[in-house]
Amino acid sequence: MRDYLIVVAGGKGLRMGGDVPKQFVPVAGLPVLMRTLMRLHESAPEAQIILALPRNHQAYWQKLCIRYAFDLPHVVADGGATRFHSVLSALSHVSDEADGVVAVHDGVRPFVSVDVVRRCMREARNTGAAIPVVPVVETLRRVKADGQASHTEPRSEFRMVQTPQCFRVDVLKAAYAQPYSDAFTDDAGVVETMGHGVTLVEGNRDNIKLTTPDDLKYAEFLCLAST
């Protein structure tokens, strides 16, 4: 049985500012994407890592690997125009006969805990699909279409979704055989359209998606706090 770790790293980093895509920005001396791959490898050392990266970023990634002497084994797949197409491209490196689990993770989430990754993969092996979530701690308001009227929603009924989103190979392959839809925002949504339920697993609060300059400052803090 072989497991797979698909890492999606197609962001342009426009909200981060600067010319370097956010997945390549150094945090505490090491590019974010390298930290992410290292954490996933620590979580599942025997799993094959497949990095979905836009073709025009691949040469730069190779240079970074040389500069930082980064030799963690991984396969590079061509990233697509959307997350759906990037995952679909990465899945072409997964055999149809594989009977393991595929974990799909954001390249800019380097602080997922090892325990969360392992629990999600274990649950996916049992139920077919599992994703990490955390409770919503802020008050939520639903805004009407006119942009004026709004009302409070019970936050206890909502969860914030993280990655890795984990699935049995056969489940994810079947889901990604369907045509693309603009309604697909994550892998769990793709799987649910096939009628397959998704199990929720408790995530870790530090598993943030690095998107803004303030996120990078927090990431530096987390790295220093762990040393």
Image: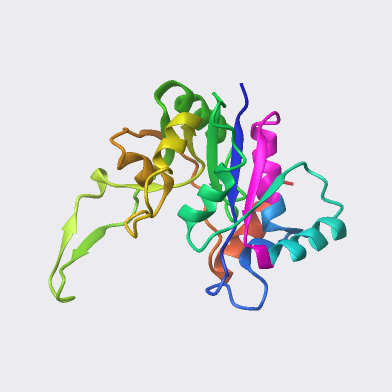
Number of numbered markers: 0
Q: Is residue 209 at all visible to an observer of this figure?
A: yes
In terms of depth relative to the viewer, which is nearer, 218 or 161? 161
- Residue 127 picture location, percent across and down: 40, 24
Q: Residue at x 58, y 46 (%)?
A: 90
Whether residue 42 is in magenta: the answer is: yes
Residue 160 screen position, x and y as percent: 38, 49
Residue 162 within the magenta-colored segment of the rendering: no
Q: In which quadrant of the rendered image does the N terminus lie? A: top right
State the residue in front, 76 or 179: 179
Q: Image quarter for residue 5?
A: top right
Q: Position of residue 117 (x, y in %)?
A: 55, 35
Left or right side of 92 for 46:
right
Q: Is residue 106 above or below residue 197?
A: below
Name the residue rendered at 19%, 54% in the picture: 153
- List the single residue furthest toward the bottom: 18
Q: How is the image coloured?
A: rainbow
Query: Against 44, is 175 above or below?
Result: below
Picture quadrant of residue 191: top left
In the image shown, does 125 or 100 lie closer to the viewer?
A: 100
Whether residue 25 is visible to the viewer of this picture, yes or no, is: no
From the viewer's perspective, tell me whether residue 172 is left or right of residue 4: left
Q: Position of residue 195 (x, y in %)?
A: 28, 35
Q: Residue at x 65, y 44 (%)?
A: 50
Task: Point out the stretch of residues depicted in magenta.
Answer: 35-56
Q: Is residue 58 left or right of residue 126?
A: right
